[in-house]
C-alpha cells in the first residue's frame, strides 16, 4: 500500500460500499457526464465514466442524478468534485442530501422476501 492510499484511508470516516448504479453528473457549464457508481459512502460517491476526462473538474459544484432502468433521472443531489482521474470522478455530497442519496441508491436492496404458502 502506498502512503497516499494509506493517508486517504486514514482520513475516511465512513465505510465504502460497492454498489453499481447508472448516474448522470451535470456540471455548472452545462456539460453532462454519464457513469456508473463504483462505491458509495455516507458522504460521497466514486463514479466510473465511459469517456476519458481530459479537462479538470476539481472543486467544481455539480448535480448528481441516479438513472432508473428506463433512463429516468432521480431528484438532484448537490455535490462537489473532490478527486478525478482519466476515467473516474469522486464526489462529495451536500450533507443535507447525503442520507436521501443513500436511501435512494439502496432502495429495494434490503426488502424482506415474502413467503406465501
Image (cartoon, rainbow, N blue to C red):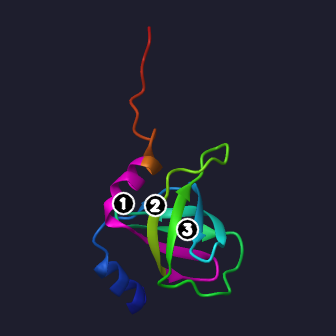
- Residue 52 image-quadrant placement: bottom right
Hey, which residue is sitting farthest top in the picture?
Answer: 117
Give the mark nearest the N terminus, 2 or 3: 3
Q: Of the residues tagged 1 and 3, which is closer to the observer?
A: 1
Quick check: marks 2 and 1 in contact, CB under 8 Å? yes
Q: Of the residues tagged 2 and 3, which is closer to the observer?
A: 2
Query: Residue 66: x, y in percent?
Result: 55, 54
Residue count near mark 1 (Cα–Cα under 10 Å), binned few <14, some 14–19, many ≥20 = many
User: To which residue does mark 1 refer?
Assistant: 98
Q: Residue at x 44, y 8 (%)?
A: 117
User: To which residue does mark 3 refer?
Assistant: 47
Hey, which residue is sitting farthest front in the picture?
Answer: 29
Q: Residue at x 36, y 59 (%)?
A: 97
Q: Nearer the viewer, residue 13 or 53?
A: 53
In the shown orientation, is residue 88 left or right of residue 10? right
Magenta segment range?
83-103
SS for callout 1:
helix
Query: Residue 8: x, y in percent?
Result: 36, 83
Is residue 55 on the magenta stretch? no
Residue count near mark 3 (Cα–Cα under 10 Å), binned few <14, some 14–19, many ≥20 = many
SS for callout 2:
strand
Query: Residue 73: x, y in percent?
Result: 59, 51
Give the mark nearest the N terminus, 2 or 1: 2
Question: Disc 1 and disc 3: Cα gap in Å?
Answer: 16 Å
User: To which residue does mark 2 refer?
Assistant: 77
Amino acid at each position: 500500500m502506498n502512503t497516499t492510499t494509506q493517508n486517504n484511508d486514514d482520513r475516511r470516516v465512513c465505510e465504502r460500499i460497492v454498489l453499481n448504479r447508472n448516474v448522470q453528473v451535470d456540471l455548472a457549464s452545462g456539460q453532462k457526464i454519464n457513469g456508473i457508481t463504483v462505491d458509495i459512502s455516507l458522504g460521497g460517491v466514486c463514479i466510473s465514466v465511459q469517456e476519458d476526462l481530459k479537462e479538470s473538474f476539481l472543486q467544481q459544484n455539480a448535480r448528481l442524478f441516479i438513472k432508473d432502468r428506463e433512463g429516468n433521472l432521480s431528484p438532484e443531489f448537490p455535490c462537489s468534485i473532490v478527486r478525478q482521474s482519466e476515467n473516474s470522478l469522486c464526489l462529495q455530497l451536500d450533507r443535507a442530501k447525503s442520507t436521501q442519496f443513500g436511501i435512494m441508491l439502496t432502495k429495494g436492496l434490503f426488502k424482506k422476501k415474502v413467503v406465501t404458502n
